[in-house]
Amino acid sequence: MDIANIGHSASSDVGVVAAGSAESVAAGIGILSTGGNAADAAVATLFVLMVTDHGACSIGGEVPLLIYDAKTGQVNALSGQGRAPLCPDAIAWYMKNGIPGDGGIRMAAVPSVVDLCITTLIRYGTRTLADVTRDAIALLDAGSEEWHPKLARTLRRMVEEESITEGSREEKLQASCDRFYGRHAERNDIADELESDYIAKGGFLRRADLANHQTTIEEPVTIDYRGCTICKCDTWTQGPVLLQTLRLLEGFDLRAMGRGSADCVHVITEALKLAMADRDEHYADPEFADVPLAALLSDEYTALRRELIDMEVASHTARPGDPIAMTAIKRETSFESGIGGTTTCVVSDRWGNVVSATPSANVPVAPRDGGDAGVTFNNRLRSLNTTPGHPNCIEPGKRPRITLTPTLVLKDNAPIIAISVAGGDLQDQTTLNLLLDVIEFGLTPEDAMAQPRFATQHHQDSFDPNPDRNATFQGAGSLTVNAEIAEPVREELARRGHRIKIADGAIAAPVMLTIDPDTKTFLTAGDPKAGRHAAGLTEND
């Protein structure tokens, strides 16, 4: 598809793609048009995003992914998140000196995008690595950045490994992945180049960290809301914040309040504050921390926390609860008073497969040479901390608790909504705005994108690893609203104690698709104010 024909919304009964750049959407549509499925198209889209949206994302970054597999009728979460170095001496250095945020390579986790993409192809796809990297390589060949020809060479070596390996499609794909991560029996040149770059730049990652990396395939965390099943990744992301917030909102009649009313904005914001406080207190990699997620989502705990919402007064304190002791407030802390680099991808196909993925990296401005392999690094270790005893404290091989948080929604066991948002701590807040627009107020994706949104900074900064977690709290009582929210509503919210800030532009950068369960029609849209794009496939494509 010609990128000139790609806009910001589309409908189709064959397949749709919505993502960051127009080029990435074209790559995904191109795969769908030649018979590839949603997994194939999503991977092609992701590889192009690593070029066109570089800085927001990178092959050296990360990408959590949710997929509905029409063959099995199951949703799986794929953990495309790299881990902290395995070396105990490296962890000791972080605990002594802190996790740097100055752009240096010591803030980088293991690169995870390549393994995520190839795992997705092996487990759910039908295409070869050569197929899904073709558009990305063409863009790299035409590019002018220092890392462009280097990364093109890396991708070509992986494609070469696929072509010379004997065996099944899956075995060929795995061989190409192993060459990148240093697990190949003979050729580990890419991994050697990555390690050399880490050493040259003073990093702690080594070949052992690369070889140990694996994309885990997990059950999603789910709740039921208004007859829909909401699927999120586990607490190595902030995803369950959305679930906790929805559980709190079940006790309120949002439709009766009216979309955009002071009551509606107020109660959603207050519910978000409570869920974000629990995120900051309890969430972490569940392989390393005993996160009480079942209790956090339980009826009893939700009821206790819901009673904390005062419809007349905006909270200015952080109030995490204690789901173990079943007390509404564990402690209360008073405070006086940026969107991160990420991009987006949602895809659906004619067979009923649906993907939502949120690629990122926050690639530092310098250095961006990518070493000999052209693989620029991420800053994701900043989403850990060095607070002894905190569940999200850095440990060898631990995943940071990231903000990246794709969403899939089912009804009667079939997918009806997929959402991906770029925007750091804003991601699940914006997802909540859009989800309620569809479920509670019946809007289409295009109409939902056009509605004014709101968000709060009443939470800790997920990118500040300061061991004093209270020092990372951003904006007590804050409420950022789009200018289109009516002035009388803003005045009423201010009267209740919200500290109002007007945002003229987009609040975060979302894409979204919906599927009509009766007609099987796909509707998709990206926020044009945030540079998102979308396209649909026709039978003639």
Image: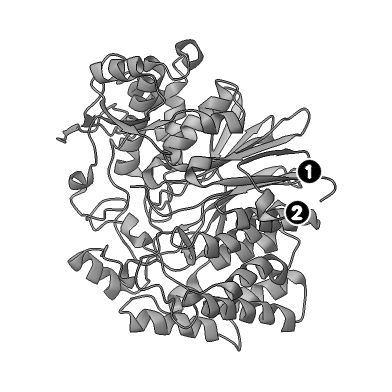
Q: Residue at x 29, y 47 (%)?
A: 461
Label 2–label 1 contact, CB within 8 A: yes
Q: Is label 1 in a helix, a strand or a loop?
A: loop
Task: Specify whether 311 is left or right of 362.
Answer: left
| Residue furthest right as drawn | 540
Please, is residue 414 above or below residue 357 in the view? above
Q: Residue at x 76, y 81 (%)?
A: 166
Residue position for label 2 = 32
Q: Residue at x 50, y 52 (%)?
A: 343
Along the line of sight, the residue nearer the viewer: 68 or 269:
269
Q: Is label 2 in a helix, a strand or a loop?
A: helix
Q: Position of residue 389 (x, y in %)?
A: 24, 52
Please, is residue 517 above or below residue 174 in the view? above
Task: Specify whether 367 is left or right of 531.
Answer: left
Residue position for label 1 = 14
Q: What count of labels does the image hold? A: 2
Q: Residue at x 34, y 84 (%)?
A: 200
Three-letter code, disc 2: Leu
For residue 32, what is the image quadrant? bottom right
Along the line of sight, the residue nearer the viewer: 435 or 66:
435
Q: CA distance from mark 2 to mark 1?
A: 9 Å
